[in-house]
Image (cartoon, helix red, strand yellow):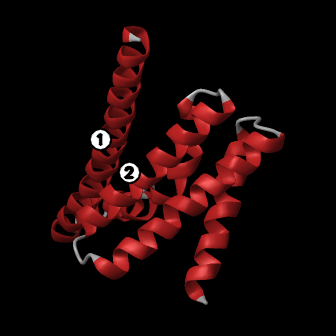
Amino acid sequence: MEGIIQIAASFAGSTGFAALYHLHGKKLWISGLGGMVCWASYLGFQNVIENAFLTNLFATIAATAYAELMARTQKTPVTVYLISAIIPMVPGGTLYYTMNYAIAKEWSLFSEYGQRTVMIAAAMAGGIMIASSFFKMYSQIRCYYTKKK
């Protein structure tokens, strides 16, 4: 039950974030579904994989793949869907605690939370890069063989 509530909250958060950037109609709902896909895949991978880096990496790959597919079907730039889709994954809480411990001069906790924040951010950047590169490569191969015929 908790997972369903989290997935519903990710939909609401992603939809709200997309609304802040003036998305309307179908694009707004597609953006919200992207957040759901991202968080549902995160929860699914978390049950299977114990490594936090890999969990975040694969969930971001899933969100990026969703954004790439929706961008192509809706003829919209990928960033419209990608930014809203990865919002649930942004390490805001760990970043807050990192800065809080830095200000409080609790260096061991600062180091622990700082490493966790950087690890999540690196996993997200890597996931976006991997999925986007795959889609770019696929599209170039498809274009090459279409021109060849």
State which quadrant residue 130 falls in. top left
Residue 55 seen: yes
Horizontal and vertical percent position of residue 126: 27, 44
Q: Are marks 2 and 1 in contact (CB under 8 Å)?
A: yes
Q: Amino acid at mark 2?
A: Ile
- Image side of residue 8 versus residue 128, left or right: right
- Separation (CA) of disc 2 from disc 1: 7 Å
Compared to 127, does 141 lie above or below? above
Residue ranking furthest to the bottom: 1
- Image side of residue 139 versus residue 127, left or right: right
Q: What residue sits 46% from the left and 66% below the top?
A: 41
Q: How dense is the environment of label 1, judged by Cα within 10 Å: few (below 14), some, or many (20 and up)?
A: some
Q: Residue 61: give its label.
A: 2
Q: Identify which residue, 68 or 19, lies in the foreground.
A: 68
- Which residue is labeled 1 in the image? 130
Compared to 71, does 142 lie above or below? above
Q: What residue sits 32% from the left and 33% below the top?
A: 133
Residue 80 seen: no
Q: Residue 108: give its label.
A: none
Which badge, 2 or 1, comes first in the chain's sequence?
Answer: 2
Residue ranking furthest to the front: 149
Quarter the N terminus occupies: bottom right
Q: SS of the residue at dot 2?
A: helix
Horizontal and vertical percent position of residue 76: 64, 28
Q: SS of the residue at dot 1?
A: helix
Q: Amino acid at mark 1?
A: Ile
Q: What residue sits 37% from the left and 65% below the top?
A: 97
